[in-house]
Image (cartoon, helix red, strand yellow):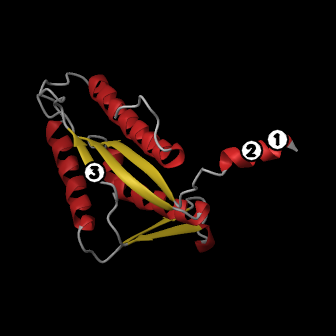
Amino acid sequence: SRVQAAASAWSAPLKLSSEIDVVLAAALDDPWVNACLLDVAYLVRHLVRQRLNAAAQITGLLLLPDLGGSPAADSSAQGCQAVLHAIDRVTGPHEGFVSTWCDGSSSNPDRSLTVEGWGPPFDRGCYLLGALNGQSLVLGSTGERTELAAEILLHLAITGLASLCDDVVGGVSGWAM
């Protein structure tokens, strides 16, 4: 039929990639992030490999806590420092990362998941976003920091889309990144 011919003509230039880009964004002043950031990074890599038969290329976007005048500044600083030390430990050569999750309602070992990783948690880099913007002005609220993180995520997504368009159709005129 004409529909099948048209569909195959449009899909022919598309190259399916065996890599999936993942951006892991986290605020380091959150206690849950301190406890499970590396678990989530290696779990994402494991699930993408197992379920999608692809390689996850992970970028980290970590929001540093604003330590200016907060009553919880000491605990935020300690938690942030612990996470950064944990990331540093697995970024260089290491013995491997192993974590096991069990279903809390059952003691059955078949209902558990073990994740192992030997590479760095962030393949494409890890960006630390502090309490200052690009012009060294203080971002006064969590909302402003979140907006800046969203702009960075948007730029990362559009940059990836532009490179995909370059691969597929030889570039898109008028796009500037």
Relative side of 137 to 99, left or right:
left
Q: Residue at image x 57%, y 66%? A: 50
Q: Residues within 10 Å of mark 2 (few under 14, many from 20)?
A: few
Q: Which residue lies furthest to the bottom in this view?
A: 95
Q: Could you say whether the residue bearing mark 3 is in a helix, strand or loop?
A: strand
Amino acid type indicated by mark 2: Ala
Q: Residue at image x 74%, y 44%? A: 7
Q: x, y percentage for residue 28?
A: 27, 43
Q: x, y percentage for residue 67?
A: 14, 34
Q: x, y percentage for residue 53?
A: 58, 65
Reading the image, the residue beneath label 1 is 3
Reading the image, the residue beneath label 3 is 126
Q: Which of marks 1 and 3 is in front?
A: 1
Q: Residue furthest right?
A: 1
Q: How far apart are marks 2 and 3 (CA)?
A: 39 Å
Q: How far apart are marks 1 and 3 (CA)?
A: 44 Å
Q: How far apart are marks 2 and 1 (CA)?
A: 6 Å
Amino acid type indicated by mark 1: Val
Q: Residues within 10 Å of mark 3 (few under 14, many from 20)?
A: some
